[in-house]
Image (spheres, grey):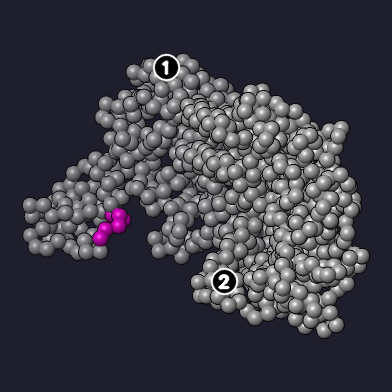
Amino acid sequence: MPDIIRAEWLRYRLWVLLYALAHLLALAFLNRLTDLGQQPVNVLRVFAAGYVVTGLLLGLHQMGTWRRPNQWLNLLHRPVAPWRIGLGLFIAGCLGLLVAIMLPLLLAVAWQAYGTARVVDLRHVLIPLAAFLIAMCAYFAGAYGLLADRRYAASGLVLILWIMVAKASGPAAILLQLIASGYTFALAMLAFRPDLGSPPRSLPAMVLVAIPVQAGIYVLILLGGFIAEMGWIMSGTHPGNMVTPPKGGFTEAMRMSPRDRMLAGLEDVSLPDAPLWREQVALSEVHVIERPAGAPALRNEMSNSAPMAFEDHDARIQWTFSHRHMRYQGVDMATGLPAGILGAGEDNAAFPALATPLGDMPGLSRGDVILAAGPTLYRYVAAVKRILPLLTLPSGERIVRMTPIGGSVAVLSDRAVYLYDGRYLADGDHAMHPRQRVAIPGHAGDLSAIGLVELVDGYLVSFTFAAQAYDMVGVPPYLTVLRVNDQGMVTPVATRALGEDYPAIYRYRAWWPSPVILALRPWAVGFLAPVDDMDSHDTPPVPAPIRTLAWALMGISLLWGAWLARRRELSTPARLTWTLACGLIGLPAVASLWLILPAAERVPRLEHLPHHA
Amino acid sequence: MNDDPVIRTIGLCKRYAGKMAIDHLDLEIGRGSIHAIVGANGAGKSTLFRILLGFLPASSGEAFILGRDCRSLTPHDRERIGFVNEEHTLPGWMSVDAVTAMQRRQYRHWNQETFDETIGHYNVVRTQKVSQLSRGERAGFNLALTLAQQPELLVFDEPTLGLDVVAKRAFLETLLYSNATRDCTVVYCSHQMEEIERVADNLIIMERGALRNMSPPDDFRARVMHWVADIPFRGPDARLVPGLLEVQRIDGLYHYLVLDQGEGFAGFLHACGARDIHHLPVSLDRAVNGFLAKHHAVPRAA
């Protein structure tokens, strides 16, 4: 095997070194322009896409040149077991990726750590490893793409898709990437054998090959639905795209101004104060508390889910949060030299959670910045260069947004809206206590809009729950209005159901093709990722007609699977297993059976051949 | 050494998209000597080798090489089988020395003397990269590598395809006069009849995936006769001519190439009104070509 590794390394050596050099120069250039360690996920995704393409091309080229019939015969017809030859080639390929991708990234991180005052944490050291693993996963997927039967060879790409959609971050993401790379490696090794394209022989091998094929077919079904939706939009009848959305539906509600939405919530209210409220809503400013987009920042995540730096323009200092120290580290923007460390409170203690800047607020002194860390809101006081606590929510809650509401301040957590007196925010001498707390009357993941109107003796607060009303996950959309008085007592005013706009067959488009795969999807996407309360939904049960459709499809799949299995060269247990799998998993399993196991080659009997007669 | 056949197939079939590449092939090739396999393009020769070496699954039937089921060849079995194809595929980015060293480490019975003797017939510099060798030199290098492995069975799949006359002769002479081939069985597949005539002890003809002949080349040649007849009127209907492989009318004389007809064919020609009849021996090339051309597909209008 060392011979094979050496020979293959010699083949790619020059290209690998040239790639590594170009990669290093590109990183050095970009690191001069910006701090590559503090980039949002989309920037890292662009880099990852480049590494995926690199890995794929390497796998396709390497195996593409070897798999030509005579080359393949010459490579494998030797007294070395095929798996050893395959392993040798793959090790050489991985070595190439290590040098071309991981090494320049490590050098860039080392330069950041030892050549600058920028923040370098464990998460930055993980980036080269993640890049290498992603490239390796794509490399094996590319190799598998050329070694496996072309009918299902592209299924290795599903593992790359898994890495793309998975929510795991930091070391958990590394573990997930390791599993995905290991899976594609196992696929490539299975396909690496003299009789290329032959179906897997053992049950574990068959399961290993079938899972990504079925997942891939499922993704294609969803893609087909997406394409059909494009046609729906073009026809001008798509509820989300119609000039006039369906009456009474959630699309109409979401297109309303906050005032109209609040008035729509109060429309059928017959309480004695209702006419007065309607009048006040029509005349007053309706404030909006927006929910943040995207996932919360997590410790040791490789990209920044939220900005983790702010600037003190007067002092010419850029403060960047260090995940390692859980404090802000300053860099003098004029000299690039270290400019101190900022923790929480007077004693510069480590923050209990990641502290993300929320920006400045009206009434704050020049240069001051509001920061949120878990349940605590802080204020950076530029004059003394200290970060001081402003308020703390009950334990277990997380601050996600802060919005000025006239003279008050609204703080949105993952469970409630808190209203504070804004004056204390400006003077900063008092620990702030909420005047009112309004619990979110539903699941935070369903929440799409919050409106707030100040009354003479409190507030009217409207919550619209329609965040994912277009698919099966979200709660059936509704709008609810609450009143909270000056004493903090919350009273329900009205709840109005909104039309669902989309037919059930559309909303459940991910479910009925394969309920089993859909049940596994959240597990796969959320694998090793923490649960986020802002992503919880009050998912309704599946409607009976959709359940009937799914059962019917499973029945058809069972029969179709049984029919296909009979026409394959399979043992009775294997035939039975495939048939049951088709019935359970549905159309993706039927398609995988058809793709992985081609119909048996039927050879005419000797006496039926004219030239043998 | 046992007497088991080196290659044995029983009812072997391979079907590609509705076409039979190997058609119920029963073949048995004994140990020793040089066996030539000939056949038109698409006769199934390369498919047969690919099945025998375990690189292609058969549709049905069984195939054995050196007594082992070809679907379960071990690295040890592969060590006993040398294979040379027409492309002489070798890693072009490596030097001759590096490739040699790699092969030497992989093959336990490597014979450096055989390698040196064989490579000595070619003007190959050891530090040269394989990609810098001419096609003939690469063929010679490939042959040297294969012979030095000391295999029990040597399979050549059109090894001289694309070589010029000089390189072709050098290749054949190296093969014929090498000590390394003395103790092994050689299966030689080629379209070049002059090569077959020189090297083969046994002639195997394949056509459309089926075995059509297996005999010493001279025996096969003796089965094919070229008759020339002066028939004043119209010759007999070709469909009625027994064993007919080919018929031509040149300068008013009918030329018949027939199979397995013996002297009795003269009587047939006389009965058809022939006045003057004589027959000529045919070359192996002519005999095989005539044999293979008989069933070759022709345009409908021809």
The residue lying toward the viewer, choosing from B117 and A229, is A229
The residue lying toward the viewer, choosing from B262 and A336, is A336
Q: Residues within 10 Å of mark 2 (few under 14, many from 20)?
A: some
Name the image quarter holding residue B170. Answer: top left
On the question of residue B257 being in view, the answer is yes
Residue B262, image x, y percentages: 26, 50
Residue under label 1: B127
Secondary structure under the numbered disc 2 in the rendered image:
loop
Secondary structure under the numbered disc 1 in the rendered image:
loop
On the question of residue A56 being in view, the answer is no
Q: Which residues are magenta?
A: B294-299
Q: Chain of mark 2?
A: A
Q: Residues within 10 Å of mark 1 (few under 14, many from 20)?
A: few
Residue under the image location 39 percent in, 27 percent down: B131
Residue under the image location 31 percent in, 50 percent down: B292
A359 inside magenta stretch? no
The residue lying toward the viewer, choosing from A304 and B183, is A304
Q: Amino acid at mark 2?
A: Asn
What number is the disc on residue A241? 2
Q: Amino acid at mark 1?
A: Thr
